[in-house]
Image (spheres, rainbow, N blue to C red):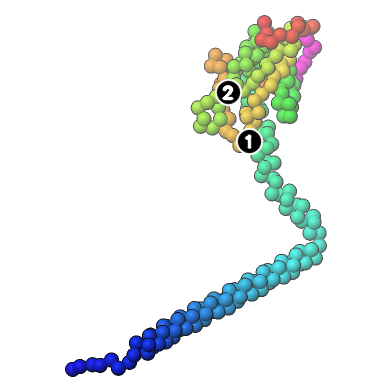
Amino acid sequence: MIELNLLPDVKLEYLKAQRVRRLVLSVSIIVSLAAIVLLVLLLGYDGLQKKHLSDLNGNIASETGKLQGEPNINQILTVQNQLESLTSLHNDKPAASRLFNYLNEVTPATVSINDFSIDFTQQTITLTGAANTLSSINQYVDTLKYTQYTSGSSKTSGMAFSNVVLSSFGITSGATDPSQAASYTITLSYDKDIFDITQNIKLTVPSEVVTRSGTQQPTDLFKKSTSPSSPTSSPSNGGQ
């Protein structure tokens, strides 16, 4: 079968250009429609977002108005803030209840305390009391100097007390109780960690010292002074 192309080249080029034109026009229309749809979606999203923000602002304003209308709202908020700070205040306060256990652990059985004062701000302690001999008082001073502490499961230790000074001592004249034959006053500083309520502290007392916590029938730690002491010697850092 024989086919004859009777169309001139110009006509063929024209028909080809028409097809390309229709193709380009179709693609342009599709792209334009897609752009219009995307624009509509973006405008709708923007409108919805603005409406959502407006609704949120309205809700905030409404709830704020309700809160401001509550009676004594300022007092309530103040109390709430104070309650939130209780935890930090509790952690910052010293564990003062440990003091009596510490004194029992470090005070020799032959020494008693007539009076003591503690300053949790300056971290200092003053002890006044009596003992059977001046040697026992010296032993007390050395015990305080070399007592260490550990915190929880930590293997590291530190000195529990520092600046231990035997500021005065003497022999009590006319003492009817042999355990009150000598008097003393000791001043010292303590490591703040031993009263840290967030830590579990354990004291390590020199083993050669027999303290009240180590005896089966300990004597009273605190005793009232019954008689005045004789003139004391000059202050010393470690006793006689």
Pointer 1 or 2: first along the chain: 2
Quarter of the image that includes the N terminus: bottom left
Q: Residue furthest left?
A: 1
Q: Which structural element holds mark 1?
A: loop
Q: In the rendered structure, which amino acid carries the disc numbered 2?
A: Gly
The quadrant in which residue 182 appears is top right
Q: Is residue 4 above or below residue 235?
A: below
Residue labelled with disc 2: 158
Q: Going 73% across and 15% down the picture, which residue do you hit?
A: 185
| Residue 223 shown in magenta | yes
Q: Residues within 10 Å of mark 2 (few under 14, many from 20)?
A: some
Q: Which mark is residue 152?
A: none
- Would you name the residue on which mark 1 appears? 197
| x and y percentages locating residue 52 in the rendered image | 65, 71
Nearer to me, 29 or 103: 29
Q: Residue at x 68, y 37 (%)?
A: 92
User: Please, is residue 167 above or below residue 81 in the view?
Assistant: above
Disc 1 marks a residue whose amino acid type is Ile
Q: Residues in magenta?
A: 222-230
Q: Where residue 116 sits in the image (x, y, percent)?
A: 73, 22
Does residue 109 show up? no
Figure quadrant of the C terminus: top right
The residue under the point 64% across, 25% down is 191
Q: Secondary structure at mark 2?
A: strand
